[in-house]
Amino acid sequence: MRAMPLSVYRYIFRYSKKKQVVVILMTLALLPLAPIPLELQRRLLDDAVANKDVELLVWLALLYVGALLLSAGIKLAMRIQRELISAQIVHSLRRSVFYCIYTIIPPSKIKASAEGKDVVDEGAVVSMLSSEVEKLGGFAGSAISGPLLQIGTLISVLGYMFFIEPLVATIALILYSPQFIVVPIFQARMNRLAAKKALKVRELGNFIVDQAEEELLEQEPPQAFTNLTDTILKIRTKFLMTKNIMKTINNLLIAMGPFGVIAYGGYLAIQGDVEVGVILAFVSGLERLGGPIRDLIGSYSSITDARMRYAILLSSFPSHVDADDPTPMPKVMGKDVELEI
């Protein structure tokens, strides 16, 4: 027997180490491709179009399309691998939940169960085996490669922008940086609300499981049921309000980046200090930064949410002992499996 990892990342590594390495290698292969389209856009305008060089225009256009196709192919392979990791972790978590709650159980609870006492909250177990492990599994696929790709893309694109025009890049960075202060403040509140909601949903499941069926049929919803659903609605409403306010602030801050670059870069172009192609490359670069910034914020939210959910999961186990033997993925495509469409 071995202990359940206290960290969600350690659990993910335990059951998907090799697949995670493959995804990380794919991510590292993507990073050098991020600034290539920006440089090609700049050269298309400043070198090919400005000099009316059709042959150079064709070659640069072919390179641009080739870079896009290569990037798309790597991303497709990476997405498939991430989904396989998520499926593996959901599969393993379900076995771990069962093992911790039913297989390894304190002797006092075995005795209580023999005496006819209810020692397991079946509603909570159903919630853990269904929605809770699904959400943790969904996070597992991009737990490492997601932040690595987003941070790497930000560094690559910003590095390119600083190399071309440091002052304009600094303005863009200043306009984007407040997000990294705003997000943790809002995310902390969202995590508290998500934890409360998860526990209340478990209570709702326990309530339904504990009630005799004949006491519920053809009856108005009991007051306890109504109170629980009302509480869940209030928590969900607060969560959605907080989430949408954070998104609005983030979108406004992201929109300020192109404005600052066009305003200041346009002034420099009028003065003859920079070429128009540089401004176009910067605007395109900011668009490329906007996606990774949003994804990085989403990754931060997912990481904190996963840690919270995993902690709640562990706190529900009477014993933090996991199975010794690995849980390999079964064959999901083959003669023994029939798919109905």
Image (cartoon, rainbow, N blue to C red):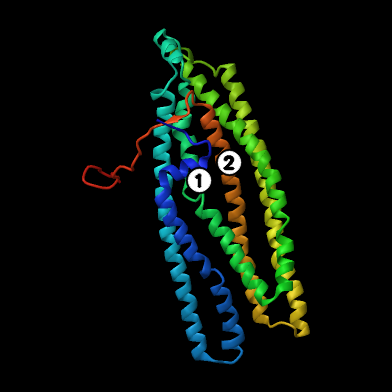
Q: Is residue 231 left or right of residue 29?
A: right
Seen as rendered, the residue at the extreme bottom is 52
Q: Nearer the viewer, residue 145 or 21?
A: 21
Q: Nearer the viewer, residue 202 or 17?
A: 17
Q: Position of residue 25 (x, y in %)?
A: 45, 60
Q: Name the residue tied to disc 2.
A: 305
Q: Is residue 275 visible?
A: yes
177 w.r.t. 197: above or below: below
Q: Position of residue 141 (x, y in %)?
A: 46, 49
Q: Position of residue 215 (x, y in %)?
A: 48, 12
Residue sitting at x 48%, y 85%? 58
Q: Name the residue tied to disc 1.
A: 139
Q: Secondary structure at mark 2?
A: helix
Q: Which of marks 1 and 2 precedes in the sequence? A: 1
Seen as rendered, the residue at the extreme left is 335
Q: Callout 1, which amino acid?
A: Phe
Residue sitting at x 47%, y 67%? 71
Q: Secondary structure at mark 1?
A: helix
Q: Is residue 66 left or right of residue 271?
A: left
233 w.r.t. 107: above or below: below
Distance from Cα at disc 2 to Cα at disc 1: 9 Å
Q: Marks 2 and 1: CB-CB under 8 Å?
A: yes
Residue sitting at x 60%, y 46%? 301
Seen as rendered, the residue at the extreme front is 1
Q: Tag 1: Cα neighbours inside 10 Å, few (<14), some, or many (≥20)? A: many
Q: Nearer the viewer, residue 165 or 247?
A: 165
Quarter occupied by residue 271: bottom right
Residue sitting at x 42%, y 56%? 22
In which quadrant is the N terminus drawn?
top left
